[in-house]
Amino acid sequence: MKPAPFDWHAPESVAEALALKARHGEDARFLAGGQSLVPAMNFRIAQPAVLVDLNRVAGLDAIAVGADGSLTIGAMARNAAIERHAGAVKSHPILAEALHEVAHPQVRNRGTLGGNLSHADPASEMPAVMLALAARFLIRSARGERQVAAAEFFLGPLTTALELDEMLAEIRLPPLPPRSGTAWLEIARRRGEYAMMGVAAVVTRDAAGICTAVRLACCSAGPTPMAAPKAAASLVGTKLTDADLAQAAALLKQEIAPTGSVQASPAYQRHLAGVIAARALATAWERAA
Amino acid sequence: METRQIGRPLTRNEDPRLLTGRALFVDDVELPGMLHAAFLRSPHARAAIRSIDTDAAKARAGVVAVITAEDLGEYWQPGPLLVPPPPIKGMVFRQRCQVPLAKGEVRHVGEPVVMVVAESRYVAEDAVGDIVVEYEPLPPVIGLEAALSSDSPRVHADLPDNIAADVHQAKGDYAAARAKAAHLIRRRFTYDRGASNPMETRGIVAQWDHKAEKLTVWDTTQAPVFIRNGLAAMLGLSERQVRVVAPFIGGGFGPKMMMFYPEEVLVPWMALRLDRPVKWIEDRLEHFTATTQERSQVHDCELALDARGKILGVRDDFLMDTGAYNPYGLTVPLNSQCTLLNCYDVPAYDSRFRAIYTNRTLVTPYRGAGRQHGIFVMERMLDAAARELGLDRAEIRRRNLIPADAFPYHNELIYQDFAPLTYDSGNYAPILDKALHAIGYAEFAAEKAKARAEGRHLGLGVVCYVEGTGIGPYEGAKVRVQASGKVTLATGVGTQGQGHFTSFAQVVAEQLGVDVRDVEVTTGDTDVFDWGAGTFASRGAVVTGSAAHGAAVEVRTKILKTAAEHFECAEADLVLADGAVSIAGVPENRITLGELARLANPMRGAVKPGTVPGLEATSYFGPQMGATAAGAHAMVIEIDAQTMRPTILRYVVVHDCGTVLNPLILSGQIQGGVAQGIGNAFFEELVWTDDGQLLNASLADYLLPTALDVPRMDVLHTETPSPLNPLGTKGAGEGGAIPVGALFAQAIEDALDLPARGIEVSEIPLSPSRLWEICNPSG
Amino acid sequence: MRRRVTLSINGDAVTREVEPRLLLSDFIRHEAGLTGTHVGCEHGVCGACTIRLDGAPVRSCLIFAVQAEGHEVRTVESLGTPDALSVLQQAFRDAHGLQCGYCTPGILMTMTAFLEENPDPGEEAVRHALSGNLCRCTGYQHIVDAVLLAAKRLRETA
């Protein structure tokens, strides 16, 4: 299990990195933390001719909380750094909660959020979390930059809206409204492995204790991270009683499209989705109080 | 004063080297000019090889050799039958052994087809990618029952069908037992495959020294002596010309006992042919299909009981997947057949098994080696019987235990060691009682009800097992006192983490009155000691330990004789302790073992006729039959009834392996066995397609238990010494792993009250997904 | 396309000409000759190859050697010696926290860092920290005991 040969470039600026990627096109891959790409290369499933290593590029790993409670995360911020960032933990606690389930400490020490999202594994936690948080992604290329909503970013298994010459540069999370609560819940065979099902729940309530907004998204639930807007909408105006949660769970089970894996049948995955969606919503609701 | 060394929880002699990264493992061997091998392996479960084009691979820079089966000439031979079948009347046994490189047809995914040798492993893998093999895929044999149908394809075209073996053994008269039974219980069970996955994969380094005309092979084998003897014969060398070293091995668990793996045959041959050292280290991807596996069986069992729940007889008929070849003969199915009787008094037994060739990876013993299947069947049958008779599950077991005064207990079957299956000693009721007490069996009903009122699902499991250990043929040991006063012990077995450097040292130190730290143990180097069979079947402590004991006793005799001559006194007046001999009551009259060693090996002067120099002895031990250990496991599990995620709340092991050499090492062996049992029961499953492709050949998809999956466990002991060896000990390597599947099944049924819903757990491995399907058959 | 790289391993500079694809684990073992770091899976799951990169435990099988230039690599050889084991190593010996010893160096590197950040951990925290290192021999119980024992000894001598 040794990788095939490749040319390695380690640019020190974003411009240089983008120029290299533009030059080599589909032969080249960006190397971020390498925690998904390098295993694929060791298995020789991936054999890029050129690696553009982003680890020496300055200024891609900043984590900053805005005055309004918004959060921006540089694509090369290590998952462990996000997990430990006091500001991020406060502004968007679901990040640390979900990251805690991403692989193991040694992998999070090296892996990056940008790399994880660009890899777009539908079984991965963070793409679903991004959907639930209504994240926007800053995408850069030698041609310029653009912003894409998370909902438009994930197109299929390991497939994103990134063009060949583009790089995911920054993740922008809008502030959570007051009286919001979040929860990440997943069921994996073994801690740190891909979830058989995972659910991100974000709920907001008003001063009277009525639900005003819900966002729900699942991992391991289809070809991309799967949002569940109908289930979410069904809860607005309710107090998330057990009956409300059961109805939402039933809707969510219809909105997802799990395909099964060696660990779980699609029917079991769908069943799990209903169970843990209800639990995640209840937890988020409590936290919103 | 003699200090007892046996039974002390001593820390290990080998640890400082292992803890500081200084211990030598096979992949640590670096030699000048060393080449690296990689293999092109079959991507098909069954296919005809139409052509192989290696030109591009040969042309690649850095590639030294590319070899196919045709290139091996006369050296191409099927591997030896490692374990011939015991003489069982009327049996069918059809041997087909693995080949070094596939010729004409591939028979399982991962079977080697082409060997590449290059300047680095990286380049060797590049060259493997250059090779073009034209295959014609053929329909594979995968399912056990389908393999038996008359229109099934055949794994070996020269055989009439896919039956590798058909063996019937009986005890008593089952038909008569059945006729008088008050209850007949019938069930079907399946137990699927697992992979051993030691943290160190297999590996071989071979070096030919053409000046010394000597081949040195570093091999992750559990049986270095037989590898040495076999390689010498295959390569046309004398045994003196081949040295096999099994250095520190990163876990064995059985599959490293298999001989000869194709790579073991090819790497030394290449080193000779190229006159350069060659290294091959199996990668994890290769391990999943190229290293042997274990465990697919389907059992149809019938249990006949009287009205009180006493077993009158058992009939069992099972199929076992032996994979594409069967070099290990009948070891695994015989273990299943014999161990099924467990610790119970079963007057009548009628058992047939058929081993079936399939287009899957070879099956050879992996920790438990078929015993867990037998235990699973018997324990599940007793659970079903208890329900049918309205008996408590502990009570039905207690009523059937072999009584303490019935030993030696004859089961009238032939066991894997060719000897009649006789339990040497045992006292089973206290084991069960101790386990029940420790797990809180009497109070559990209340505990369960209380939890259920809180919406939590608790279940308890308690199962019994036996473990046939310490089988022959024999092992040897050489003990010597050096001029420094330190003692060396050499044996032929390899060591894979069992603490041999310490437990064997304890056995020797006990006799010689030296510090355990002053006994230097060498294992697995054929230039140091080259008799013996290997480390398998939980036999190291029993067989090698007994040989070490015998050698140490002889050396002790020599020490006292030499000292008596020196002091001109009677041996009875001497005290051997603290590395010296002194005259009783006159401690200042003292001579060290080092001085005695020098006296026993004089440089000048005359010795008496017949004198054998040195304080040294070699001793061999061959038990007449295996020693049977026993135990019980109990656990309390909590299951999330919605997600089917289990959490083990309490786990108790009560184990009886006779005299305990080192309780610290023993508890480690048991805990590790339980961890593998938990993996086997609930986490580890090899998922194959109908085409014979393995879908989860990675550690991300094949789930070894982590520190969060294995609970803290209480390990308790009873001690019923074995009469079969001077130490009174029995093996303990596999007992931890054997009963866990049966335990999980019972505890899960209890937690979810499945029997009340008409559901039973009759398969292993389980997973949350599978469990949910079992509980929700309509989806 | 080989490159000349100089890595700092356990404080020593090691300069070699290597291909960019050479894994850091292979550089440490076969170029620098520090074979205490073991390789178990080469896909980042087993944890046997864990080393510390600028102090952080990482999988050396998922990093290319060329990437480690300018960073500080620490391996098991930087801990104690057979005659002077580190507190954690000694605790592993005392609590029988290893059997075959193959996974042990990776675990020592992971848990040395863990104890620096968590001087008084509970069992559950230790098990979480260990969950990225697979051991096939011990069943983990004695490893957990060893880490807790080391934490206690380190606190007593702090």
Image (cartoon, rainbow, N blue to C red):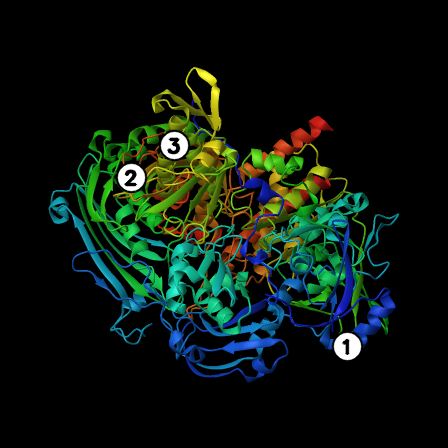
**Badge 3: few (under 14), some or many (20 or more) residues near its Cα, within 10 Å?**
many
Residue under label 3: B556
Q: Amino acid at mark 2?
A: Arg
Q: Is residue B550 left or right of residue A134?
A: left
Q: Image quarter for residue B242?
A: bottom left
**Pointers 3 and 1 in contact (CB under 8 A)?**
no
- Which mark's residue is nearer the viewer, 2 or 3? 3
**Secondary structure category for the residue under label 2:** helix
Residue B766 is marked as: none
One can see residue B417 in this view = yes
Residue A24 is marked as: 1
- Residue C93 percent location from the top left of the image: 57, 36
Q: Chain of mark 3?
A: B
Q: Considering only vertical position in the picture, is A199 above or below A29?
A: above
Q: CA distance from mark 2 to mark 3?
A: 58 Å
Point 30% across, 76% down: residue: B157
